[in-house]
């Protein structure tokens, strides 16, 4: 698993929000149900996304959550970082504390290129891309 559970949940929630009409507020309950995320867990995730201004949250009976910016402007990298993930970290894939460019572990060079490729991809992919991929998947499933 590349992403932690909180990051996976955040990606699913952001994809759901990206599918909504611009400006539409969605309740935590609605997102929880649609994205299969436990509500208490989702509330914490929304809080962290809100602090990074990736979502806008409004309290009260007419409140809810919506994307903080256009879906085309929010990258996967921002979502990962909002949840404390940092796939670009230079920590060793094998967990060896002394690993580095000067004293590499057996996987250092190959992991370095994978990490660079992954980081690049996370910076390129947006919520709009996630929405498009999700809609294509739903369409394929419906056509089966």
Image (cartoon, rainbow, N blue to C red):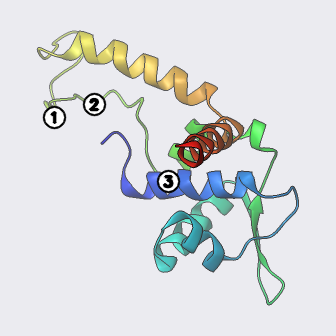
Q: Which residue is mark 3?
A: 83
Q: Is residue 96 above or below residue 39?
A: above
Q: CA distance from mark 3 to mark 2?
A: 18 Å
> Secondary structure beneath disc 1?
loop
Indicate the position of residue 61 as horizontal and vertical percent values.
80, 90
Going from the N terminus, do you reach mark 3 or mark 2 first?
3
Query: From the viewer's perspective, is 107 left or right of 13?
Result: left
Callout 1 crowding tier (Cα within 10 Å): few <14, some 14–19, many ≥20: few
Specify the quadrant that holds the N terminus: top left
Which residue lies most toward the bottom here? Answer: 61
Closest to the camera, between mark 3 and mark 2, is 3
Residue 30 seen: yes
Comparing 66 with 54, the one in front is 66
Q: Residue at x 77, y 62 (%)?
A: 66
Q: Which residue is mark 1?
A: 95
Callout 2 crowding tier (Cα within 10 Å): few <14, some 14–19, many ≥20: some
Quick check: marks 2 and 1 in contact, CB under 8 Å? Answer: yes
Residue 101 seen: no
Q: Is residue 130 above or below residue 121?
A: below
Indicate the position of residue 71 as horizontal and vertical percent values.
76, 43
Q: Is residue 127 above or below residue 41?
A: above
Label annotation for residue 125? none
> Secondary structure beneath disc 3?
loop
Comparing 24 with 86, the one in front is 24
Image quadrant assignment for residue 134: top right
Indicate the position of residue 50 as horizontal and vertical percent values.
68, 62
């Amino acid at each position: 698993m590349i992403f932690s559970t909180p990051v996976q949940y955040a990606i699913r929630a952001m994809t759901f929000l990206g599918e909504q009409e611009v400006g539409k507020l969605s309740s935590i309950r609605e997102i929880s149900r649609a994205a299969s995320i436990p509500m208490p867990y989702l509330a914490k995730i929304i809080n962290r996304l809100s602090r990074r201004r990736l979502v806008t949250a409004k309290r009260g009976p007419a409140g809810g959550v919506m994307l903080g910016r256009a879906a085309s402007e929010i990258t996967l990298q921002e979502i990962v970082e909002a949840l404390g993930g940092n796939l670009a970290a230079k920590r060793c894939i094998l967990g060896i504390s002394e690993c580095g460019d000067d004293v590499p572990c057996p996987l250092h060079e190959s992991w370095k290129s994978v990490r660079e490729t992954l980081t690049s991809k996370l910076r390129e992919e947006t919520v709009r891309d996630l929405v498009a991929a999700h809609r294509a998947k739903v369409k394929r499933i419906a056509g089966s």
